[in-house]
Image (cartoon, helix red, strand yellow):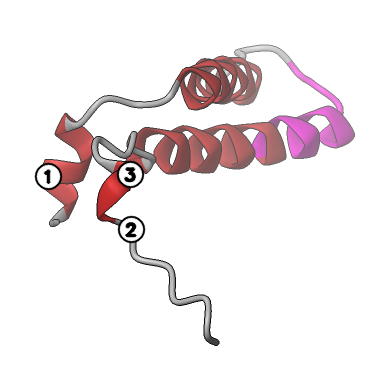
């Protein structure tokens, strides 16, 4: 399965929620970084980390897919 096929498959509910949280973090961090007013460097640093974490969480969450047929999984009990 290539990345395009993976992104087109359905995402589990938990990861949809995590994806939405990631989008919110990235958006809030980006808005703080781009603010036209003087902001203390600590807050800008935190906003930068929020943006990175939100972006990574969104990308990883979107790449998770539901297993459509679990019966295909073979378990070898002898090992």
Q: Secondary structure at mark 2?
A: loop
Where is residue 57 shown, x and y percent of the image?
54, 37
Residue at image mark 3: 70
Q: Is residue 44 a member of the stretch shown in magenta?
A: yes
Q: In the image, is 54 to the left or to the right of 4?
A: right
**Mark 1 crowd level (few <14, some 14–19, many ≥20, 10 Å Cα):** few
Quadrant placement of the N terminus: bottom left
Q: Are marks 3 and 2 in contact (CB under 8 Å)?
A: yes
Q: Nearer the viewer, mark 1 or mark 2?
A: 2
Res. 4 mark? 1
Q: Secondary structure at mark 3?
A: helix
Question: With respect to residue 21, does 47 lie above or below?
Answer: below
Q: Give the quarter of the image for residue 66.
A: top left
Q: Is residue 1 a member of the stretch shown in magenta?
A: no
The span picked out in magenta is 38-48
Q: Secondary structure at mark 1?
A: helix
Q: Give the quarter of the image for residue 8.
A: top left
Where is residue 55 shown, x and y percent of the image?
49, 36
Question: With respect to residue 20, does 26 lie above or below?
Answer: below
Q: CA distance from mark 1 to mark 2?
A: 23 Å
Q: Give the quarter of the image for residue 70.
A: top left
**Point 34% across, 65% down: residue:** 74
**Point 11% across, 43% down: residue:** 5
Q: Main secondary structure of the magenta part?
A: helix
Quadrant placement of the C terminus: bottom right
Res. 48 mark? none
**Mark 3 crowd level (few <14, some 14–19, many ≥20, 10 Å Cα):** few
**Mark 2 crowd level (few <14, some 14–19, many ≥20, 10 Å Cα):** few
Residue at image mark 2: 73
């Amino acid at each position: 399965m290539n990345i395009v096929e993976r992104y087109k498959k359905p995402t589990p509910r938990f990861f949809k929620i995590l994806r939405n949280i990631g989008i919110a973090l990235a958006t809030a961090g980006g808005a703080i970084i781009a603010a036209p007013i003087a902001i203390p460097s600590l807050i800008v640093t935190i906003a930068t980390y929020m943006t990175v974490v939100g972006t990574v969480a969104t990308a990883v969450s979107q790449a998770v897919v539901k297993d459509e047929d679990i019966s295909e999984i073979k378990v070898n009990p002898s090992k």
